[in-house]
Each structure stands twice: as structure tokens, then as C-alpha cells.
Image: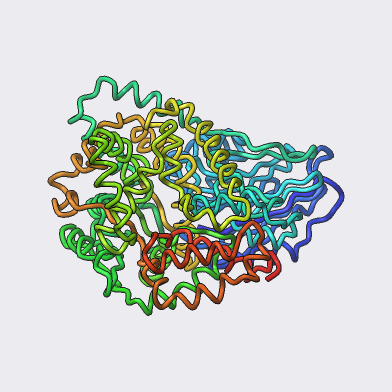
Amino acid sequence: MCGIAGIVHFDATPVDAERLRAAAHSLRHRGPDHLGVWIQRDAPRCDAPQHVGYAAVRLAVQDPRPQADQPLTDVEGQVALAYNGELYNGDELRPRLQDAGWVFRSTGDTEIVLAACATWGAAALARLDGMWALAFFDARRGDGFIARDPFGIKPLLYSAQPGSLRFASELGGLEELGFSNRRLDPSSVMHHLLLGYIGAPKTIFGGAKRMPPGHVLTFSRHGAASPRPYFDLARQVQDARAELSSTPYGEALTQLRARIARSVVRQRVSDVPLGCCLSGGVDSSIVATHLAEASSRPIETFSIGHAEHAMFDESNYARLVAERIGAAHHEWKLTQREVIEAIPAVLDHLSEPFGDRSIIPTTLVSRLARRHVTVTLSGDGADELFGGYWRYTAPAALRSFQRIPAFLRNGLILPMLRRIGSAKSSPGANRARQFRKLLRAGGGDALARHLAWARILSPEAECILLDPPTVRDAEQAVLGTARQLSRPFAPPDDVDSVLAFDVRYGLPGDMLHKVDTASMSCSLEVRVPFLDPQVVAMGLAIPFAWKVDRGLRKRILVDAYRGILPNAVLDRAKQGFEVPFGEYLRGPLRDLFGDVVTAKAVESIGLLRFDGIEQVLQDHLHRRGEHGDLLFALLSLCWWARRTSAVGT
């Protein structure tokens, strides 16, 4: 796993090697094993870009020898690759490329990707099974491209101007390359406050873009083209639906297990120690179980728990699975003090605001794992594919609520819900919070209701905005994107459209961004077997009734692993992987929040009212509302603005 950066000039401007090196140094946490810079030295073809330069930092996983260091070129220096990723079908592609005349000098996957791009051009991307962000240049043809893997597991940001193209794995690297227009994008700030993350193609800056998953951007002497898709997920899902239409449920369970097991086995490829993050939930337990089955010695597993907050502690379930599969298990019971001490470093590492507070425990479990291994597997992606979140059961719950006689709803239930305090740390208060979210989104199609349930900026918290209607603009913009991305999969009022949107937008924008940011902060590679193309295609093709049935989420996964995983794991209520930030904010984090989210900081950002933020904070502190997610997003935004001097503070 690595970090990449690069500059392509379409005019006579030479590539600044020091800028490339500075960008690489800013990414060094992603690749501590080697730093390399490559600049096109010979005069390119007359129809090629004038000057091209790539940089890469390397975390050596496959073939750690210098032969695989990056940027990697062929013997003549005519083709070059900067590559951040892992390839799982290298053994299948290598013989084909040898038959095409390529003579390999290394045993790793980077040269296979280089050879594939040199042989097939951008058409190679559809043949690669793995996770990646890459940049390729071919001096023979006078063109190149940058691209991101089909599901957005690895990040890629870029800035395209009439005279140049710049790209990097992180926004900090892109800034070191000197891209223009570092103005805060107001619509991105609103997206951050609405959902807790900034989805592709937006970034926090107006002049920088995030490459959408499964897209490629080509360039030549004429400049950079707009990103275009190279991966047709909708077609794969259609094919999978056709196969499943005549498949009995019991046989589908067998097929699903086989696809997941195959993916885990393929993703074991590594020349360095490999383990598994084990939360104690169904998804990571499935991955750990298949990994243990395929390993000749005990696998290493890693989990964290909370010494003082039992509601957020899943470590006993992780321990149960680890014992069942005979794993060498590592567990860290976090104290309140350890969590709070970790928060400044987590926020310092963010190259742009990010509002998902589960980045805190994800960073801590990554630190634990990195003490023992270089690569881990995780269960990310299964919730989006198989209906694991509470909001997927919301339509049925809303219909059930609406069947209750009106006099009971209005005279008893609603007044009682209003009286119950809001807090994630109490099961009863948390359920009341969820039902209040449910009831505020009764109208619109399935996608509109889904976004209303997913937003972290509740209507009662819109007082933080200088111009509250702007949140409606942001919500409509996301809804438009949701309809566009889900259209090839299902109509907007079909609940399958919701899962397709989450896989294509929320998963890369939030969960995968979080995992990549947290793990690479300590040079740990994380792989996600549930995002194998065959697993994803089947997951999205499976009928929704096989996923969510009478309140049971991920039904098909639970049934597929009944008798394989402990019943205690299969039948337990889902817990989010998080820390009790909302509770800490009511106590030891209150001063930190006040020191960062100041009137001066809020005024410098614009868009926000400090007195409104104070009102929302007081509502949270006194349990009149549960606003921990929004308040973390505000803390992240103000912390980032102060640290980067992106706006005056």
C-alpha cells in the first residue's frame, strides 16, 4: 500500500521536482519503506504532454525488494506507473502478459499492473481485481491516465486546469503540488454538516475534485479529459439477478458463502504479516472465520473494547469468535482517558474535515494491529450490501407505526417520545432518538426518506446556519446524485435503490474513507473481502426480503453462517463501532470543544451562527437532543480550519 502524487504539464512549464518530493513527504505515513520520484527526462513525442512527473511512497507488501519500488518504469523508461493498491488476480494476469512479450523483473503486483496498462491501455482497468488508485504514462503513445478502483476503496484527488493536471492520494499532498483555488467550497461544507462526510466528486476546496469510484481520467497533449466510468456494476448486478431468479434460498446461501470464502482466500496474498480486525459483529466474524479456515497456523485478530462503557463494548463477542477459530487474539480495553488523549492526533491527521466519529476507534484498533502485522482484513461493506443498518428497517417500522390508531399515536406515543431524553448511551433513550428520526421523514420516495434518516443535521439543529434554506439545497443536491447513481439498479421508490446508493456513494465517501484515513495514519493496509466484484454483484442482486425480514437485518448472512458462527454473535443486536463521544462531550471533552469551536473560528468559516451552535450544544448537554454526530462534525471542521489556516481564525 502506498501514497502517490503527480504533475502533468501540457505547456512548456517544467515539473518541479521539489514540489513532487514535498508531496511525497506529506504522504510518508502511507508508505514508510521507500520514497521515489520520477520525471520524464527525454523529449516526449511531439503530440505528448510536455512534462510529466510522478512520486510515490511505498508500504512494501508484495515483493518488498527494491525491484518493486515506485514509481516503476519499464527497462527503457518509456512507460511509468505510480500505484497505491493491491492486486488479487496477479497470478492469472502474469502468464497472459508474458505471452504478450513482457519480461518481468519482480514478483510483486506493481509490475503486473504496469505491464497490463502498457499492453492494454485503459482497457486494463476492467481486468484488475483489487483495490487501487494509480497513474500511468506511456511516452510511446503520448498519453496516460489516472484511475480509481471500482468501489472507491483507495482515494484519489485531482485538480485539472487548462495547462496542468495534479493528483495525490490525500488533499495534503495535492496542496504541496501547488494547485490553485484553495477557497472553501460552501456546498461541501453543507454536505459535511448534513451527512458527516463529503462525497465524490466534491472536496472541501472548490479547486480540487475527488475521483468517483470506477472512473478513469485520460490525458494527452490536448489536456485532461473528464472522468468517465470504466466499470459497469449495473450490468454485473443484472446478470446476477438473472441467475438468482431461479435459485432457491438454500442454494443462494451456499453460493454466497462460496463467493465470500473465495474473496477472503484471494485477499490473503502478502509477503508480510497479515491478520484480521475482529469487532465481534457478524461481518468481521465471517471474514476471520474464512481466513482461519484458509490458514495453516493461527491467525492474528485484533479488537478494542471500552473499560467504562459497556453499551459500546463488543469485545466479549470478538473474544468468543477468536476462541472458536483458534486465533491469536489481541484486545485493547480502552479507558476514557486513552480515548480523549487520542482525539487531537486523530483530528490533526485529517487532510479535510470528516464528521464520522467512529474514525477514533478505527484509528485505535489500527494502531493495535500495526504493532503485530502490516496487513489486515475487515468486514466493511457488508452492512450496505445486505441491509445491516437500522435505517433499512425504517420503512416497515414507519408503516407499522402508521397503522396504530391516531388517538394512541397522538395522545400517548408522541408525547411520551418528546419527554424521553436523547442519548446513545442508554438503550431506551437511543430508541426514542431513532423513532424521532423515523417520524420526521414520512414523505417522499424511498431515497428521500433514506436521506432524511441518514442526515446528522436534524431540523431542530438548523439554527446553526446563517441561511437555513441552504441545507435544503444540499439535501436536494445529494438526492439528485442518489437518483442518478441508483437509477440503473432500481426505481427511486424501491428500497433496493437505497442500498445501491449507499454502496456507490456513502460507502466510499464515509466508511472506506474513514478506514483508509485511520489505517494509513499508522501505515497499516486494510483489505475488504466483501467488496469483491462477485460478492458485490450478488449482494445487490439478492431480493431485499432476503436481507431484511420482519425487523431482522442481514437475514441471508445470518442464515448462511448459522452453525458456523456462534449463535450469540448471529442473534445479537447490532452495535455501531464507536466511542461514547456524545457522553464525553457532556463531561471531559466540553472544554476542548469550547476551545476549538469559538465565535472567531465560526465567523471565519462563514455559513454558521455561533449562537445557534451554542444552543444546540446546550440542548445536547441537557439531553434535550442527541447531537453528538453534528457536534463532532463541527469540531472536525473548526479544528481543520485552524490547523491548516484554510480560513482565517
Percent across and percent down for residue 505 are 49, 42
Q: Identify the residue shown where x is 41% and y is 45%.
A: 453
Percent across and percent down for residue 510 are 47, 51
Q: Identify the residue shown where x is 27% and y is 74%.
A: 308
- Determine the residue located farthest toward the right in the rendered image: 12
* In the image: residue 475, left or right of residue 55: left
Name the image colouring.
Answer: rainbow
Q: Identify the residue shown where x is 63% and y is 44%.
A: 146
Q: Identify the residue shown where x is 51% and y is 43%.
A: 149
Q: Quadrant of the C terminus?
A: bottom right
Percent across and percent down for residue 186 are 65, 52
Q: Is residue 97 visible in this depiction of the protein?
A: yes
Compare residues 644 and 390 and report the one nearer the observer. Answer: 390
80 over 142 or under it: above or below: below
Percent across and percent down for residue 54 are 68, 55
Compare residues 435 and 519 and report the one nearer the observer. Answer: 435
Q: Is residue 31 visible in this depiction of the protein?
A: no
58 over 105 or under it: above or below: below
**The image quarter in which residue 270 lies:** bottom left
* In the image: residue 324, left or right of residue 252: left
**The image quarter in which residue 537 lies:** top left
333 over 471 or under it: above or below: below
**How many numbered marks does the figure carry?**
0
